[in-house]
Image (spheres, helix red, strand yellow):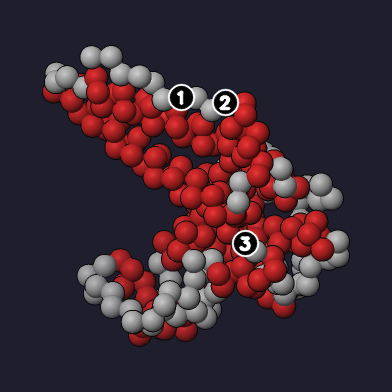
Amino acid sequence: MELEPIVRLTRDVKAAARTLSAGEARFLVDYYYALQEDRIRSAHQVRTLQAAGEPNEVLAWLGGNAGVLERNIKSALAVYADADPTGRWSQSIVGIGPIIAAGLLAHVDLEKAPTVGHIWRFAGLDPTLNWEKKTKRPWNAALKTLCWKIGESFVKVSGNEADVYGKLYLARKAREIERNDRGELADQAAAKLERFKIGKKTDAYKAYSTGRLPPAHLHARAKRWAVKLFLAHWHAVAYRYRFGTDAPKPYVLSQLQHGHEVRCPNWPF
């Protein structure tokens, strides 16, 4: 049984990627991550079949071609991101590759985001936003997922000497742990118990009921803080390139480090 391989990205198609619309780029970013999940599932299935001594050629072919498509899409999105100075700045940051750089460019419309606060809200990173039942989601699910991936990436690269935001995540987490141990977050622990149904036999409930946030909550808080700081810098860079002036500084940015602004890395770029 002969199976034709998937056609690789041609030079002409790659060049056309520079002019992708925002909608097309968003689709490719979503499709890339869907392909990635399917390839991982396919590889797992092949390993299972191999262990059982069963035929697996077709599934192996499928997984291989999924990998080719992934690389093709990544190449196309790299061209798209490289065509924009903000996309190039994004990729200068350790932990940010062409997929995430392209995703941010495709999702964020600066005309609708005069401050980074608008991006935080659109990405579901504003803690004051609540999604009430039977109402429209107040944030963009795809962008929120992308920001979650950014946070995970910063955690993974925190040991890299050239990393910036991963180390800021670690520093923030250490500070949150200290505050938590001193009982300074007790009101937030109480609010969590009041708003959500948490199993009383869980470790999380044990922490909340004693006025403390559990480790997973502290991890998420520190990671979210690092992502919001990165987005603040991303907005400052994008705004400068788009409008030729400095972006308005949000009030909350001055509070991220107790009034000390964290300078944008690799800037001027």
How far from the left and from the top, in percent, is residue 27? 48, 50
Label 1 SS: loop
Q: Position of residue 189 (x, y in %)?
A: 42, 78
Q: Is residue 136 above or below residue 220?
A: below
User: Residue 170, can we see it?
Assistant: no
Q: Earlier in the sequence, mark 3 or mark 2?
A: 2
Determine the CA span between mark 3 and mark 2: 29 Å
Residue found at x 39% / y 31%:
66
Say if 17 sits above or below 247 in the image. Answer: above
Amino acid residing under circle 3: Val
The residue indicated by pointer 1 is 7
95 or 84: nearer the viewer: 84
The residues bearing labels 1 and 2 have C-alpha atoms spaced at a distance of: 8 Å
Q: Is residue 18 left or right of residue 123?
A: right
**Secondary structure beneath label 3:** loop
**Residue 74 vertical placement versus 266 (above, below):** above
As rendered, which of 201 and 235 lies closer to the eye? 235
- Residue lying at the far top of the rendered structure: 2
Left or right relative to 252: residue 133? left
